[in-house]
Structure formats: C-alpha cells, structure tokens
Image (cartoon, grey):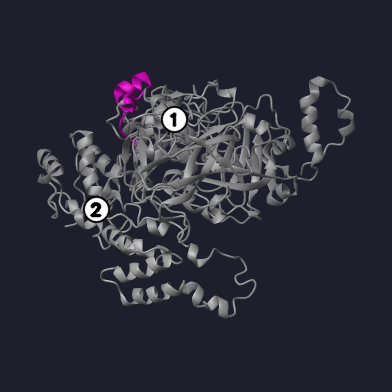
Amino acid sequence: MYKSLEFHMSTWTLGAVLLAAVASAQAQQHFPNIGRAATPAEVAKWDIDVRPDFKGLPKGEGSVAQGQDVWEGKCASCHGIFGESNEVFNPVVGGVGPEDVKTGRVAKLKDTSFPARTTFMKAPSLATVWDYINRAMPWNAPKTLSANEVYAVTAYMLNLSGIVEDNFVLNEKTIVQAQSRMPNREGMTTQHALWPSAELGGVGKPDTANTACMKNCASDVKVTSMLPDFARDAHGNLADQNRLVGAQKGVNTLRTAAAGTGAKAPAPSKDTNKGPNEAVMGLLQSNNCLACHGLDKKVVGPAFTDVASKHTGKLDYLTDKILMGSSGVWGSIPMPAQTLKPADAKAIAEWLAAGIKP
Amino acid sequence: MNKLPGQILKAPEHFLSQQDIQAVKKQTPQGRRDFLSQAFAAAAGITASAAALAQNASEGDPNILKLPAHATGLGQGVASPGYGKPSQFESNLQRRQSPGLTQTTQASVSFAPLQSLFGIVTPSGLHFERHHQGWWDIDPTKHRFMVNGLVKTPKVFTMDDLMRLPSVSRFHFIECGANTGMEWGNVAVPTVQYTHGMLSCSEFTGVPLITLLEHCGADLKAGQFVLAEGGDGSSMTRTIPMSLIKSGEVLVAYGQNGEMLRPENGYPLRLVVPGVQGVSWVKYLRRIELGDKPYGTKDEAIHYIDLMPDGSHRQYSGIQECKSVVTTPSGGQALLDKGFYNITGLAWSGRGAIKKVDVSVDGGVNWKPARLESPVLSKCLTRFNLDWVWDGKPSVIQSRATDDTGFVQPTLKQLRDVRGTRSIYHNNAIQSWLVQESGEVKNVQVS
C-alpha cells in the first residue's frame, strides 16, 4: 500500500532545480489513499508490449517448421494456409519480393494497379508483428499462445514472405537479423503535420492551404462521380433509414432512379440486371472466364449467378479475387490470379456486385 | 399514403405520376382545399380508401377531425420502463454497417445516423462503433487501471479510486481516422451515415491523465511518449501525444452524456484524446505506460498509416483536421417540395474551435456564411444552419469550415494532389450533395 509523504511543507523550501520533484510530490501528496503500488507480478502480467527496438521482448525461440504447425492449427482457418486469404481479414502474406528485402521499400506500394496491401507489405518493424500476435491472436482466443509459439508462427510468416530460409529459427537474438530484412523497414515517414507536437520531428505546415473564397470561386462545375444506378439499393432501402417526419424523407431505393420519388410501381432494379451487357460479355469471352464459370451453371468454378448472390455489393472484394486469385471459397480447386487489366476486372466485378439473377 | 403520416397535404404528388400531377394542376381552381378534393377525384385508378380520405380532406385533416386514441384514453404509468427508450416511431434511426465492408461483425464498424440527428450531442445508443475484437460488458468492480513505466511508483487504481478523484466534464467529438475513407477514389456509398458516420460527440467525464501520471511520480522529462492499452481481447495499444497529456486535455474517462460509458464505447473506462482519431481513444483502458520512445503498435505500423503516392506510409498521423458536412439535405433523402429549407450540418476541427462555416448551393462557385449554433467549443462538433429557398432546379450543396488556426477545409482535388487516392485515412474534403429536379439528393464528387 502506498503511503503518503510526510514532508510536504519542507519541499517548499527546496531550490528551483527540484521543481519537477516538488510538483510530483505535491500530486502524490494531494490525493492520499487513492490507488496503491502495483506488485512486480501484476506489472509483469500486464506489461507485455514490445517496442520496435525490441524493448520488452521475452526470450524464446521457434522454427519455421514449428510455426507451420501452429499456423495450420490456429491461424489458417481465418488467414488461409499460406496467409494469402482475403476471406475474413486482409491477407497477411504476399506482394513482397527479394528486391524489397534488399531495399527495405516495397515496390508494389507504388503500383496503383496492385490492389492488395498485405501485412508484410506494410509492417516496418518485426517487433510490432510479434507484439500483435502475442497480445491479440488467435482472434477468438487472444493471449493463449506461448512465447515460443509466437516466435515460431512469426518465423513461418517470414518464411512465406521470402524473408528467411526454411531452416530459420527465430529467437530474441536472430530477430534483429530478420528485422534487417523486413521488406518495408524504410517505408515509414513522420514528415507530416498530423502529430500535434515536435517529438517525432514532423512538419508544422498542413498539406493543403484552401482559402475561404466567397464569390465566383469556381467555373464549369461538373459531377465527376456518383453511384451507378445498379448500386441504388446496395445499402438497403434508404426510406427506412430516415426519420418519418421532417423536411426530408429517405428515398425509396427499391424503385428505380428513373421513376424518381413520385412515380408508381416501377420494377425493382435487380430484376433489370440479368445477363451481362455486351461490354462485360466481351470481357468474359476474351479473358476465357467462361471456360471455368457458366453464367448460371457451375463448371469448374461456381456459376456467376452464385458468385453474385453470395457477394452482392462487394465490389472491391470481387475485384481483388479476380486479380489475385482465390481458393477455398467454392471448393478445393483454386482460381489462379487473372492477368486482365484492373479496369476490366473491376467492370466484371461491378456486374457481379450488382447481384445478377438467373 | 400510410407511409407518410401527417403528409396528407402532400399525398397527390406522391402517388400520382408527373403527368397526372400536371393534369391535376391545370384543373385546379384557386385555393388549396379545392385543389385537394379535385386532385383526388382526378386521379386515375384511385382507391376507395383514398376516395374516403378525399371526402374527409374536403372538410379538413382527419387527424384533427377524428380525435385519436391518445386524446380520448388513459396513457401509461411512470417508470414503465425504468430506463426510457426512443419512440417506436424512431426505429429508423439505427447504427448501421456498410454492406460488404467487413467480413465479420466483431472486427467491424457501425455508422451513426447523422442525417437524422440534431444539435451536437450523439445519443449514446447511436454512437458509432469500431471494434477490433468484439465488445464486452465488463464488471466495473473488477476492472483495474495500472500506470507504470517511467514513474516513481507503478500504481493500480480501482474504479472507486478513479471516481474519488476531482473530475472534469467536457464535450468533444470523436472521429475514426478512416471516416470518409471509402470516398478517396470515387463515390462509394449513398448517404451521410456511411460517408461521415464514424463521427460522434459526447460530454465525457473523467480525470485528466496528467493528474494520474503526476500522482505516480512521473518523470515528465525523460517520459516523452505514453502507451495506452486496452483490457479486452484485442488489448489495443496506441502511442499518445505527450503535449496533449501535459495540456490536461487527455482524460481517463468513465462518464458519457451524464451516465457511465456504454459497453460498446469502452465501459467502464476509456481514454479521451481530444482532436485525435478515435483509435487512440483506447476502450476498456487497463494500462498507461510512460516511456522515452514511441511504441510503433500494430495500429500505428500496419493499420492507421496513410499510404502516399510515392509508396511511403505516414506513421503517427493522429490529428483530425478541420472538416464539415451538410447532414440535411444529404444523400439518399428527397425534398418534399420547392420552397424553404434549413440547410444544416456539422463542423469540427482536431486543432481547436470552428471559426466559420460557409455553404454553397451551386457546387462551390458562390458561398454564404452559415449561422453557428452555440455552443462553439474546442475539438467539439459545431452545428451550422443556413436558410435556403429551393427553386426546384438541380443544386450542388457543399459546406466549408474554417477553424481558429485559420485552416480552411480543403477540396477533394487539393487533398488528392498531395495524398493521392489510396490513403484510406484522414479524408477531410468538402462533401458535395446533388439535389436533382425530382428532389432526390445524391452523393456526388464534382470537379
């Protein structure tokens, strides 16, 4: 139990060099019998954070092979056998190459046509990965892995990412070596104005400097982006998402846009979206999509109508799947990554995301 | 008709086609009552019940002429229920997920229905949610809070301890760093709930963190960074700016809008970091560590980092810069008719108080200063209003906020010129809503 200090008055006589200590003593003095000293065991149980400079990292070790066992037992159901799955969470592994390991900058982060941003494309510090697995994984049973299991599973992910060899053993010493090969270790900057003070050496000037112009501030205003009509009900019926009274009502999005808010009995927009339009059909043919997918029949892969009904509205997800390939969603046969243009993939995904019907 | 209670005067426009309405208007003699009765009679395919209503309408509103049950019966008693709930007619106001955004509900987001809220305070039950590993309802008698690191005495506090200390109550906004993040490249969602709904504002009650650090004998010279850590499964960690802690703004909070925090918002204890993105407001707060270096946690090394066009990521980007949005009229709504409307919305800045909000109804060509509703508080939502008479023509409505540092909310183009389109985080661009001739309002981006 913390005991309040008894020399309150005498502290006032000390010199200015001890002002900080005085303030501290005053604070402690100010609130007697509030809180108690933590025991060493309590601090050890809760103080588990590992800093990027490895402060706080416990001893232990694990091999790539041991890590594979842990992964397949406790991680693969969400993250995929090879850490590539996008089913439940963003992919952990992928998108990094040997050149990135040399330079410490992940080249694909500059490639606007590459949609994925995996954990190992982004993470600058291996300690962060270790800390996060240790504190929060497995997702449904956090803090149940031993330190050795965390080392092992981290080694396995490093191996999948091509950062360490198959026989690598990760421990509190070799982690320094692995850190020096992290693909995005040089990829971070604090040169911005979004931290409120100077501790990180940022800049004071914000990115933008708009002015509060009041008259004739723009010309030729054009709408450059709005939701396509087929996505009208992607967020449900907006009439049910607004209050019943007030100056504005929610729009009934179960009706088509052409009908507006005042017309009667238009058909639901979904019914108008049956087959692909000519442009999409052309893409399906020219990219051999129809070799594996029937419009409304399973071939090697699932029918497009089944994909559409399972993943309605998931434009980005579908685009990623087309571009990066997929496995385990519709059976054991994987779909390889497709080589079509991202814009074409998106066009197909838009058609699917609109929820086509047979 | 039943879907629009109180709107009997508006009914003809709502089930007649535009042609029918035009036909009716031509036949309409002077006077609203005559118009109404003839309008109903003129309608093709009219139903018997509508005809009956039309008969009543010629005498007046049946909601006036026929006294309702609540005017002729006995109502309900006190304390039933003991904790009151919103009217059954308000059930459209819900926190909602954006379809397809996440694959699970435990690592997900729900958005607050900004389109239907008043003033600046978010009702606690409609506060937006962001959970990384599900929410918990933690027994407050068993919750503990620890301070360790560069302190003379690491200490443990119970909720009783914390609630004995002198407290402060302050209004602040909390905004997720990824709010409006789906709109960097193009319009992706239909309404203000989904574009801006990871935003809420509450009165928070708690103890300044600096008080607790000093109470533990903190070394505030060597201690340049604080780690905040949650007590739930995710045990969220974030590095907290020392300058804000020293200013006394950062609170260890247990109160929200006059009661305890809601479980979804961190009951019984969360950090309040005014002006900084929501991920730093660690929920189920169990520990504060004072250290000499930043902590590079998962949510400041893998997520909540801003991808720049050169492929680098900005780390430790916390401040929510000056931003505003018109909440009505807004996407997914429909104006009932031409005529008067109150354009209203919210403005906020992570750097201080809102000084000014301007509103444009022509896509940013001309602007008028809006009225700011009191109170206007630092790092808090500010409500603005502007009178507007809609002439029935297409209109693009925008708002543009200026904070007390003089910073003016940017256009989307200005932001993209620096940050590209793949950042996800910290999109504080001016929002545009297109009012179409039909009255329907659409989320748009303009050049």
**Which element carries disc 1, helix, strand or loop?**
helix
Give the residue displayed 52% in from the left and 77% down from the top: B67
Which of the marked residues, 2 or 1, is nearer the chain's N terminus? Answer: 1
Q: Amino acid at mark 2?
A: Gly
Q: Is residue A105 magenta?
A: yes
A72 or B284: which is nearer to us?
B284
- Left or right, residue B150 beside residue A194: right
Q: Looking at the picture, tell me which residue is in the foreground, B376 or B338.
A: B338
Q: Which residues are magenta?
A: A93-110
Q: How dense is the environment of label 1, judged by Cα within 10 Å: few (below 14), some, or many (20 and up)?
A: many
Residue under label 1: A126
Q: Residue at x 77, y 41 (%)?
A: A2
Which disc number belongs to residue A355? 2
* In the foreground, A126 or A166: A126
The foreground one among A243 and A193 is A243
Is A305 rendered above or below residue A221? below
Across and down, in percent, residue B309 comes to: 37, 25
Whole-percent x, y for residue B32 in the image: 42, 64
Measuring 45% from the left and 74% from the top, which residue is drawn there? B59
| Residue B200 coordinates in the image, percent (x, y) | 54, 46
Q: Quadrant of residue A17?
A: top right
Q: Is residue B33 left or right of residue A7?
A: left
